[in-house]
Image: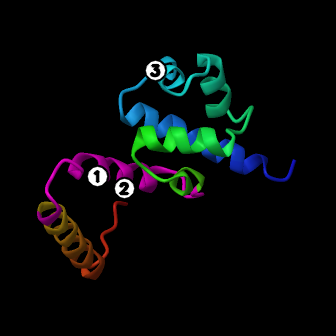
Amino acid sequence: MKDRGLVFRVGAAIARRRKARGLTQAQIAEMIGVEKETISRMENGVISPTLPRLQQIADIFGCSPVELLHTETGETAAHAQYIGEIIQELSENERILIVGFVTEVVRLLKTREPTTSE
C-alpha cells in the first residue's frame, strides 16, 4: 500500500503525544470507546484511525487532526511539541514573550561562528 508510511507516521504521532501527556493506551481507548488493542494497533501502524476517531484522538491531545497527519518526525518535532506543552498553561502574553525569546536566541545562535567538536 502506497500510504503505509502515513499510517506509521500517524501512529507515531499518536504515541508521542499520548506519552507526552502521561496517558496509557488503555486510558485513550476508554476515552474514545475502543479496546486498548485498537490504540496499540494504531500506534504501531497496523491500522489507520477513521476520520471520526482521528478527530476524537486530536481532541484529547488538544490539537487538530492535521497535526496528527503532519509528516515531520524526529527530535525537532518532539522538542517543539514539548515546548508547546510546557507553555500552554501560560497566558497568551506570556506565550508570546517566550516565543519572542526563543526566536531571538535562535537568531543569535545562527549568527555565531561555528565550533568544531573534533
- Residue at (50, 17) in percent of width and height: 26
Chief secondary structure of the magenta portion: helix
**Horizontal relation, residue 105 to residue 20: left or right:** left
Q: Nearer the viewer, residue 107 or 89?
A: 89
Residue marked by disc 2: 80
Mark 1 crowdedness (10 Å alpha carbons): few <14, some 14-19, many ≥20: few
Residues under numbered marks 1 and 3 in contact, where contact means CB atoms less than 8 Å apart:
no
Residues under numbered marks 2 and 1 in contact, where contact means CB atoms less than 8 Å apart:
yes
Quarter of image, res 53: top right
The amino acid type, in three-letter code, at marker 3 is Gln
Mark 3 crowdedness (10 Å alpha carbons): few <14, some 14-19, many ≥20: some
**Horizontal relation, residue 45 to residue 107: left or right:** right
Residue marked by disc 1: 83
Which of the two labelled residues, at mark 1 and mark 3, occupies the earlier sequence position?
Answer: 3
Residues under numbered marks 3 and 2 in contact, where contact means CB atoms less than 8 Å apart:
no
- Residue at (60, 26) in percent of width and height: 39
Query: Regarding mark 2 in the picture, which secondary structure is present there?
Result: helix
- Mark number displayed over residue 27: 3
Q: CA gap, disc 3 to disc 2? A: 24 Å
The amino acid type, in three-letter code, at marker 2 is Ala
Q: Is residue 20 above or below residue 109?
A: above
Considering the image in quadrants, where does the C terminus appear? bottom left
Residue segment shown in magenta: 70-93
**Horizontal relation, residue 60 to residue 108: left or right:** right
Quarter of image, res 103: bottom left
Q: CA gap, disc 2 to disc 1? A: 5 Å
Question: Residue 55 placed where, x, y %?
Answer: 55, 45
**Horizontal relation, residue 93 to residue 17: left or right:** left
The amino acid type, in three-letter code, at marker 1 is Ile
Which of the two labelled residues, at mark 3 and mark 2, occupies the earlier sequence position?
Answer: 3
